[in-house]
Amino acid sequence: MSKILKEINKRRTFGIVSHPDAGKTTLTEKLLLFGGAIQVAGAVKSNKIKRHATSDFMEIERQRGISVATSVMAFKYRGLKINILDTPGHKDFAEDTFRTLTAVDSVIVVIDVAKGVEEQTERLVEVCRMRKTPIIVFVNKLDREGKDGFDLMDEVEEKLQLNVRPLSWPIGMGQRFKGVYNLYERKLVLFRPHGKQEEEEEVIEFTDLSDPELDRYVGESAAEELREEVRIVEEVYPAFDREAYVNAELSPVFFGSAVNNFGVKEMLDCFVEIAPTPLPRPTEERMVRPEEDQFAGFVFKIHANMDPKHRDRIAFLRVCSGIFQRNTNYLHVRQGRKMKFSNPTSFMASKKTVVDEAYPGDVVGLYDSGNFKIGDSVTEGEELHFKGIPSFSPEQFRYVNNADPLKSKQLNKGLDQLMDEGVAQLFTRDSDGRKIIGTVGALQFDVIQYRLENEYGASCSYEPVNLHKACWVSCDDDAALKEFLQRRKRDIAHDTHGQLVFLAESAWALKMAQDNHPKIQFHFTSEF
Ligand code: G4P
């Protein structure tokens, strides 16, 4: 086997998504502990943007700085190199998460057994479904009372529109939680409440649940219940089929308790067997396959550095094909010029190291002084444009004004760069040239103001603007487009890429525009 194929086969690149507080951070930490990537539990946790800290953007700034280190966490397990791409759980950073999902090959969704499927999970899974990303579900917090297993499966099927197949099944929950039965490996995994986290789980090979021995392990009534429930599972759900999972048609489900490190290893062992190796990626020109000779990759995230004196940033690039090599001339496709990277960085939990080579599925951090935008392609020379890295139509808007006339250059530069990073979107209205910032969450306005001041020495003020949605418009019929632009003059703007945008004041105004101009297409993501 060629070297590149060997390296590709070793890699699994995935993301963990959940509604805040379901246990994503805890699970990430346990996975890293299995891989020996961190020694102390709590190392990832300290980087989390706490919900109660969200009004305090100084705290967010601090977190943002540290979270560079946790943007990508790599660890080795059973001879594989596993890359976890961190996704912010906070809803105001959902767009960051959507973009990170373009760089993964599969996803683990964490659900709180008591709360069931929550709002943020629905939105994130919808994006995964659109992209046909294979999903494993981890139902967490079984040490607490929660919903009945079957009810929860129904909820997942309904709200997340996933076909599920439990690969483990809980034995009781809360006070009566005895463990799980691993249906994938036919093993009984026993839960020791108050057991030390470092201790190994007690795992017993148990192929035949009708064996009376089961009663001895979990007690008679729990044993009966388990037999009955597993019988139903086998009857109701389709048999596990790896191909269906990889094609995003079937989602295996595991149960456990992340904080107790329980049921995590079962999921991880299954994950490394079934999760896809780095997948091909579509570009406007053609499909890019990981095993190709020539290197190609795209930037999915840009992170400003914390040192305000240096305005440099780190662009996170996912390697999609070939071998990325340090100090080699590559083409920055959008700018049409060659670039070399002398300090490409990889991340092993909190450790940063310079890498000489990276393979498909890997993420490298490139030091950047303002050349990159999200979605940019880097190749060995071919003009490729990776698809599926959209901007979402924002939901919150404010006019942005320059609060210091002497610093307008700094303001424009700062705004440009923050938009490149994907913090928010900037629209300039055609009729009066006013600048409007659109974001997915309200928090970004504070972040922008703070960063403009601290990194660019510019100050801005906001003014409310009555807007419901900004959507991109296109039309094949020139005359119809001209008429639309003429009639809706006041509501037309351009984004920073020069694309046409319609600013709708209300849901009703949007509907009217759609009804009155049937030839115009309204798009809610920037990619169409
Ligand atoms: P998130 O990243 O998805 O937002 O969730 P995170 O891991 O931070 O977990 C949220 C809370 O849920 C934490 O409690 C965590 O300890 C707890 N938790 C995680 N897994 C389990 C579990 O299996 N069982 C139970 N009972 N709780 C779990 P916290 O009080 O917010 O933080 P901490 O002070 O305990 O660290």
Image (spheres, rainbow, N blue to C red):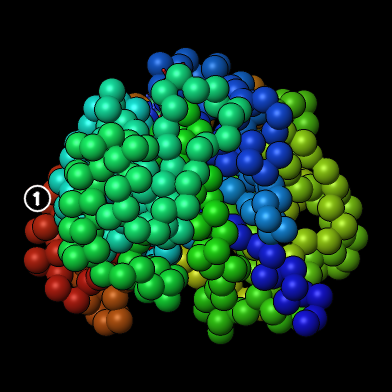
Residue 518: percent from left, percent from top: 14, 73
Q: Is residue 62 left or right of residue 79?
A: left
Which residue is at a point 75% across and 73% down the rendered structure image?
Answer: 6
Q: Is residue 50 left or right of residue 76?
A: left
Residue 119: percent from left, percent from top: 25, 40
Q: Is residue 4 left or right of residue 298?
A: right
Task: Report if the beta carbon of the residue with label 1 is closer than 8 angstroms to ligand 1.
Answer: no
Frontmost residue, 201 versus 440: 201
Q: Label 1, on which residue? A: 508
Q: Secondary structure at mark 1?
A: helix
Q: Is residue 372 left or right of residue 405?
A: right
Seen as rendered, the residue at the extreme front is 212
**Are there few (<14), some (14-19), or many (20+) residues within 10 Å of tag 1?**
few
Answer with the quadrant where ligand 1 appears in the image.
top left
Is 61 situated above or below 288? Answer: above
Question: Image quarter for residue 375?
Answer: bottom right
Which residue is at a point 63% across and 41% down the rendered structure image?
Answer: 34
Residue 525: percent from left, percent from top: 36, 59
Which residue is at a point 30% across and 48% down the rendered structure image?
Answer: 212
Which residue is at a point 50% across and 70% down the rendered structure image?
Answer: 387
Is 366 situated above or below 450? Answer: below
Quadrant location of the C terminus?
Answer: bottom left
Specify the amino acid type for callout 1: Trp
Q: How many marks?
A: 1
Frontmost residue, 478 versus 158: 158
Quadrant location of the N terminus?
Answer: bottom right
